[in-house]
Amino acid sequence: MLDIKLEQDKHIDTIRNLISNLQYEIGQLQGRLTNNVHSIIAHGYRLSQYDSQQQITDKSETTLQASIDSFGHFHLQPGQDAKRVVRYPGYLCVTQQTVFKACEQQVLKINKTKQQIADYLSKHNQPVSIKDPINGQTKYIKNGLLYEAETMANHAMLTRKITLIDKPVEWFSYSWNQDFLSESFASLDDYIYRIERQFEQPPIDIDCTVWKKQLAHVIHQMSEIWFANDGRVLKRIRPKPIEPQVKFKTINQKTKIKPCKLKLPLICFNPNGNLVLKQALPDVPCHKELPQQARKYRYRRLHPYFHFYECTPVKNS
């Protein structure tokens, strides 16, 4: 038992040392940027943590200094949910090549340390359960090692990399990415189990008897689709959290312009300082609905409270 405790203490010390190294390297980058604000063009936002429905509830523009400070923000405050992230989509465009090159070297050190932390946590992390001293409830902590080492550190914010573009950038354009997560189940029982465990938990606006009849009908539909053997399939298709993204074009770029998801301000270079912002980040949209028909399938949702769909192949004429 003592050997296990010593081993865990060693892991905790290692993570703390890695985080201390990371904070030092981030501080070096922040200092260099702060000392050269006259040669930086900046634009960025701070997005609130996701709420219980995984929606972004607040968006605000940030100052240049706030964007610089965001690189070191991975500790959340008491009262905040340490599992939910804060994002800082934006850019810092450096106009002096010597300053940019120095920042580039620093970003490489930061990203390397972040990767070391991620790898170490992946290898040695042990999930833990802790008891709330106020209400006595047991809470499951997935990143137990990180929790023991840095209680309010958010794993995603701690290990997210800084994006760097070393070619001169001509313009930026913000937007939102709205996507879906599609999941096929290995057996019909997987679907039915997810329905059956909700039988005694009707929504507040639905009578319990009506609710049970609805769920029984859903199970009947799933069974009919499953055994029909006519090409239809059952899928669970959930909306992914809405994410900010940006498109950018480098000078003389010939390749296709692809959107880049941003969690921290990216650092880029433009020697003339004539960077164009073509589109600011729009207001946070409601997540789009899954279209009834796409190129591959026609979709029918089996019940509004479940993300279960009948997927019928679209026949090409």
Image: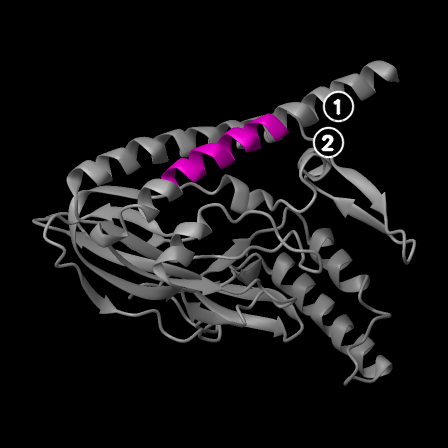
Q: Nearer the viewer, mark 2 or mark 1?
A: 1
Question: Where does the C terminus fall, quadrant-wise?
Answer: bottom left
Tell me residue 159's x, y (percent): 51, 39
Magenta portion: prevailing SS class? helix
Locate residue 121 relative to residue 4 in the image: left or right: left
- For the N terminus, the image quarter is top right
Instruction: Say above or below: 290 vs 148.
Output: below
> Mark 1 and mark 2 in contact (Cβ < 8 Å)?
yes
Specify few, some or many for label 1: CA neighbours under 10 Å numbering under 14, 14-19, or 20 or more.
Answer: some
Residue 15 position in % (x across, y down): 62, 28
> Which residue is label 2 attached to?
126
Which segment is the magenta one? 16-29
- Amino acid under disc 2: Gln
- The amino acid pointed to by label 1 is Gln
SS for dot 1:
helix
**Residue assigned mark 1:** 8
| In the rendered image, the vertical position of residue 106 relative to residue 131, given as above or below | above
In this view, the residue in front, 33 or 255, is 33
Residue 25 belongs to the span the image colors magenta: yes
- Whether residue 110 appears in magenta in the rendering, the answer is no
Q: Is residue 264 visible?
A: no
Res 178 label: none
Q: CA distance from mark 2 to mark 1?
A: 9 Å
Residue drawn at (47%, 43%) of the image: 160
Judge from the rendering whether residue 104 lies leftward or rightward of residue 2; answer left or right.
left
Tell me where residue 214 appears, x and y as whole percent.
Answer: 75, 77
